[in-house]
């Protein structure tokens, strides 16, 4: 079992650009959640996808959007990147929206 | 609304000493509580969880935590620290539908030889 996988591992973008991060859930899991972890802080919940629909959303602007595919994998899209979007983006999966199993994260740097 | 407060952003103990990492929560309803560990450049790994069964919860790597409703606390302990325990630890809370995990700001544990 590969667990939760994320790609890419690192990414560098400039302000105003758009970025797409990808996540494959742990085998058998049907729910994917995304978190933003700024340097020195705890993860902050962005949103959760279940049955290809956004089920829950944290306090993030509409620049942050996502998608879940029929195979339960997910994408996180961020438009109009700001310097403050630099962070580790964590994907977590779960079965029937129970406790999250986390992937290794994607480190996004916005210059 | 739910929130988590972790007292002490850095904790340093000697190898073999007791580890105590503090977590207090705020929740309008009885919550579920979790402790996660994060090693450098890695994601978070679940150590243990409280979901309203026994109030003393045992987790992996010898860690345990006790849910104390009267004190709104869920402190993490380990009787004897190992060098391999050096990492950052996060306490998290969710409602009983596992919606919207809220994490504390983390405590970095340093273990001295």
Image: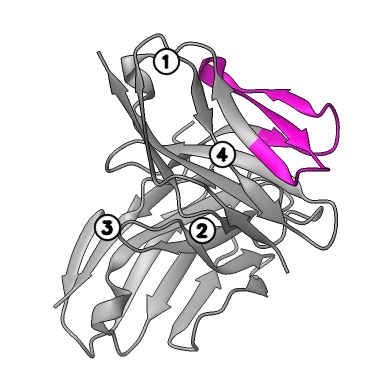
Residue A73 disc label: 2
According to the picture, the residue beneath numbered tag 3 turns out to be A8
- Foreground disc of the pair 4, 1: 4
Label 1–label 3 contact, CB within 8 A: no
Neighbours of disc 2 within 10 Å: few (<14), some (14-19), many (20+): many
Task: Work out whether residue A71 can be spotted.
Answer: no
Q: Residue at x 47, y 11 (%)?
A: B80
Marks 1 and 3, how far apart at CA: 35 Å
Q: Is residue B48 left or right of residue A12?
A: right
Helix, strand or loop at disc 2? loop
Label 1–label 2 contact, CB within 8 A: no
Marks 1 and 2, how far apart at CA: 38 Å
- The chain that hosts pointer 2 is A
Where is residue B40? Give x, y as percent: 28, 39
- The chain that hosts pointer 3 is A
Considering the image in quadrants, where does the C terminus of chain A appear?
bottom left
User: Does the magenta segment cover residue B24?
Assistant: no
- Foreground disc of the pair 1, 3: 1
Same chain for the residues at labels 4 and 2, yes or no?
no
Where is residue A63? Give x, y as percent: 43, 87
Q: Which residues are magenta?
A: B49-74
Marks 4 and 3, how far apart at CA: 34 Å
Helix, strand or loop at disc 4? loop
User: Does the magenta segment cover residue B55?
Assistant: yes
Point out the tag, 4 or 1, that comes first from the N-terminus. Answer: 4
Q: Residue at x 40, y 47 (%)?
A: B9
For the residue pair B17 and A39, the one nearer the viewer reads as B17
Helix, strand or loop at disc 1? loop
According to the picture, the residue beneath numbered tag 1 turns out to be B81
Helix, strand or loop at disc 3? loop
């Amino acid at each position: 079992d590969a667990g939760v996988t994320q790609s890419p591992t690192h990414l560098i973008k400039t302000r105003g650009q758009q970025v797409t991060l990808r996540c494959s859930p742990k085998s058998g899991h049907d729910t994917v959640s995304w978190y933003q972890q700024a340097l020195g802080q705890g993860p902050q919940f962005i949103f959760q996808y279940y049955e290809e629909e956004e089920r829950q959303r944290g306090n993030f602007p509409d620049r942050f959007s996502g998608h879940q595919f029929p195979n339960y994998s997910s994408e996180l899209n961020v438009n109009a990147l700001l310097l403050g979007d630099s962070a580790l983006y964590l994907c977590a999966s779960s079965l029937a929206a129970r406790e999250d199993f986390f992937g290794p994260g994607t480190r996004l740097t916005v210059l | 609304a739910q929130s988590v407060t972790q007292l002490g952003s850095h904790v340093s103990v000697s190898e073999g000493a007791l580890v105590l990492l503090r977590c207090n929560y705020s929740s309008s309803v009885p919550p579920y509580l979790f402790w996660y560990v994060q090693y450098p450049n890695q994601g978070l790994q679940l150590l243990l969880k409280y979901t309203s069964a026994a109030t003393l919860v045992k987790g992996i790597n010898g860690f345990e935590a006790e849910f104390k409703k009267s004190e709104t606390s869920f402190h993490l302990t380990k009787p004897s620290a190992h060098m391999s325990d050096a990492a950052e630890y996060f306490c998290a809370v969710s409602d009983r539908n596992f919606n919207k995990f809220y994490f504390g700001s983390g405590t970095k544990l340093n273990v001295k030889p």
